[in-house]
Image: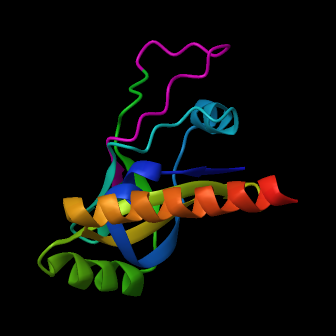
């Protein structure tokens, strides 16, 4: 199962991406396996020599009950030090941002795809939507003629 951050793909050009492990609690893993995670407003922040996923919403797993569970807490990402150094350098460039692109399960562990994004302008977004609509119309015409 792969959960994609469509908002990040709409708002940013993803220049480069990295695979990072993520530290989760047991109830968070169960909740993600049910597809209950919201990455739209989240971003990756580097503090010191560590990377964190900030503002990702993982609702509490319903059968479990934890009174002090915080669904939008910061979660530590597991990256090599050379990857963190590379992300620090790329994030320092003007107009670039670190965004989570997707989260998926690999060998029974959850991985987060972190992308270095450059912001799209409004007209770029419209061009992408226009091209997608044209492709959809062409597909419909081909299906209609067969």
Question: How many marks are shown on the rendered structure?
Answer: 0
On the image, the x and y values in percent for residue 35 come to 64, 36
Instruction: Using the image, determine if residue 138 lies above or below residue 13.
Output: above
Q: Percent x, y for residue 46?
A: 25, 65
Q: Is residue 25 positioned above or below 53 on the image?
A: above
Q: Residue at x 46, y 72 (%)?
A: 79
The residue range painted magenta reads: 53-68
| Residue sitting nearer the eye, 137 or 120 | 137
Name the residue rendered at 32%, 85% in the picture.
Answer: 86
Q: Decide if residue 98 is in sight here.
A: no
Q: Which residue does the image show at 41% across and 54% down from the upper left?
A: 76
Residue placed furthest toward the left: 94
List the single residue furthest toward the front.
145
- Residue 55: name its quadrant: top left
- Point out the image quarter for the C terminus: bottom right
Nearer to us in this view, 10 or 15: 10
> Which residue is nearer to you in this view: 94 or 142?
142
């Amino acid at each position: 199962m792969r959960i994609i951050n469509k908002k990040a793909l709409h708002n940013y050009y993803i220049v480069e991406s990295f695979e990072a492990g993520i530290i989760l609690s047991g109830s968070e893993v169960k909740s993600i396996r049910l597809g209950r995670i919201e990455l739209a407003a989240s971003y990756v922040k580097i503090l010191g020599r560590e990377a964190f996923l900030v503002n990702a919403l993982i609702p509490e797993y319903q059968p479990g009950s934890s009174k002090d569970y915080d669904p939008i807490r910061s979660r530590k990402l597991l990256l090599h030090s050379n990857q963190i150094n590379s992300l620090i350098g790329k994030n320092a460039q003007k107009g670039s941002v670190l965004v989570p692109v997707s989260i998926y399960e690999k060998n029974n562990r959850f991985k987060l795809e972190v992308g270095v994004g450059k912001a799209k302008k409004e007209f770029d977004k419209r061009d992408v939507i226009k091209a997608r609509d044209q492709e959809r119309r062409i597909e419909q015409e081909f299906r209609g003629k067969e």
